[in-house]
Image: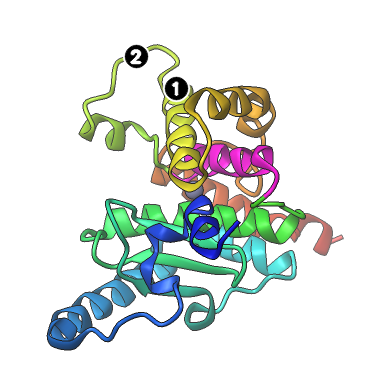
Amino acid sequence: MDQTKQEEDYGYDLFPERKKGKPSQGLIRESLFTFHHKCQFMLQVAVDTSPYAKLLLSAMKSSGCKVFKDRHFSCEDCDGTVSGGFDAISSQIVLCQNNINQQSHMTRVVTHELIHAFDHCRAHVDWFNNYRHLACSEIRAANLSGDCTFSNEAARFNFGLKEHHQECVRGRALRSILALRNISRKEAEKIVDEVFDTCFNDHAPFGRIPHSKKDANFANRDYENRGRYYASL
Ligand SMILES: [Zn+2]
C-alpha cells in the first residue's frame, strides 16, 4: 500500500496540515492568522468554562494522561466540512479553524475529541486495524459530547423521532467511520450494530448521558466530589 493510499484510508486526507511539506501560506497568511487566534481563544473558553471539557480533562489527569493545551491541541485548516479529529499517532486533537465559527460548536468539538483522547488514554485502542474499537469510541463520542442533544438536533430539523437520541448517535457514529475509513456503508453498519449496546451504555467518565449543560454540570460536580467521602473517614 503506498503512502498516499494509506493516508486516505486513515482519514488524513481531511487534515492537509498533517501532511509533511505543506506549502507556505503566502498572501492568505494574514487571514489565517486571524482564524488561528480566534480558534485558540475559543479553545481556551471551552476548556475554562465547559463542564463537559472540565470533567474529561480531570478524568484524563487522574488516568495519568494530563492534557497540555499547547502540546495536545492544534488549530489547523481542514478540508471539506470536517470540524475536528483525534490524531492517535501524535496524541493531538485537531480543531478545524476554518470550519468552527461559534463557541458552542467549538465546545462540542473539543468535548467530542476529548472523549476519543480519553478512550485512547484508558484503553489500548487499535484505531487503525480494529474497526470495532473505532466504532465504539465514535458511539461514545456522539452519545456523551452533546452532539445529539435536543437543541443541536432541533437545529438540524431532526427532532420528534422515537428513540431519537439513539438513532442520532448511531447515524453520527456511522458518518464518522465512513469519513475516516475506506469501508462500505453496509460493513460500517454491521460493525456499529455489533458494538452499539455495549458502547452506548458505557458512560465513563460522566456516569450518565449528559443531555444538557445542566446534566454535565451535575456530572462534573459528582466527579469532583467522588473521593470526598473516603477522604473524610
Ligand atoms: Zn469522532
Residue type at tag 2: Leu
Location of residue 23 (image quadrant): bottom left
Residue matched to label 2: 161
Image quadrant holding the N terminus, namely: bottom right
Residue type at tag 1: Glu
Q: Is residue 159 left or right of residue 204?
A: left
Q: Position of residue 82 (x, y in %)?
A: 34, 53
Count neighbours of disc 1 (C-alpha within 10 A) and say few if under 14, some if 14 to 19, many if 20 or more.
few
Q: CA distance from mark 1 to mark 2?
A: 9 Å
Of the numbered discs 1 and 2, the one sitting upstream in the chain is 2
- Label number found at residue 167: 1
Looking at the image, residue 232 lies above or below residue 204: below
Q: Position of residue 196 (x, y in %)?
A: 62, 27
Camera-near label (1 vs 2) is: 1
Q: Which residues are magenta?
A: 129-145
Q: Is residue 105 left or right of residue 134?
A: left
